[in-house]
Amino acid sequence: SHETPQMIELALKHGIDLFSLVRKTTHKCQPLDVGIFGPVERRWGDKCDELTDIGLSVTKDDVIPIYLEIRKEVMKGSNILSAFCKTGTHPLN
């Protein structure tokens, strides 16, 4: 699951209704897998390839900084909305 107790509490505090999508369903039911987590995974692979090509490797000390860099590139409101549109699952508001 991608939700945490803190995220649920924050959503409820701000009047945001949450609903869960069934795991392992088609991409139409998983817009963030299509528009966010898939691109993060692909970008991670690209970054590892880039480092390998110049003779470097990813160490355990590199994982978090690299992930945060990729997350900043991908995790944008416009990408999230686009993901819902691509799968035909549009947010209510």
Image (cartoon, rainbow, N blue to C red):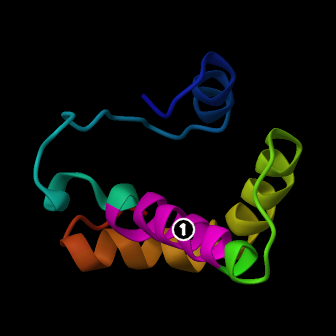
What residue would you read off at disc 1? Answer: 45
Q: Residue 34's spot in the image, x, y percent? A: 33, 66
Q: Identify which residue is drawn at 46% across, 58% down.
A: 37
> The magenta stretch spans which residues?
34-49
Q: Residue 65's spot in the image, x, y percent? A: 86, 54
Name of the residue lying farthest toward the front: 55
Say if the magenta span includes residue 37: yes
| Count of labels in the image | 1
Q: Residue 1's spot in the image, x, y percent? A: 42, 28
Q: Residues within 10 Å of mark 1 (few under 14, many from 20)?
A: few
Q: Looking at the image, which is closer to me, 15 or 68?
A: 68
Say if the magenta span includes residue 88: no
Q: Amino acid at mark 1?
A: Gly
Q: Main secondary structure of the magenta part?
A: helix
Q: Identify which residue is drawn at 45% across, 73% down.
A: 81
Left or right of 72 on screen, residue 29: left
Q: Looking at the image, which is closer to me, 3 or 19?
A: 3
Left or right of 69 on screen, residue 14: left
Q: Secondary structure at mark 1?
A: helix
Image quadrant in which you'd find residue 21: top left
Q: Identify which residue is drawn at 18% across, 60% down.
A: 27
Image quadrant in which you'd find residue 52: bottom right
Name of the residue lying farthest toward the left: 26
Name of the residue lying farthest toward the top: 5
Q: Identify which residue is drawn at 41% across, 64% down.
A: 38
For residue 1, above or below residue 67: above
Q: Residue 29's spot in the image, x, y percent? A: 18, 52
For residue 90, above or below residue 6: below
- The quarter in which the C terminus is drawn is bottom left
Left or right of 70 on screen, residue 3: left
Q: Looking at the image, which is closer to me, 37 or 93?
A: 37
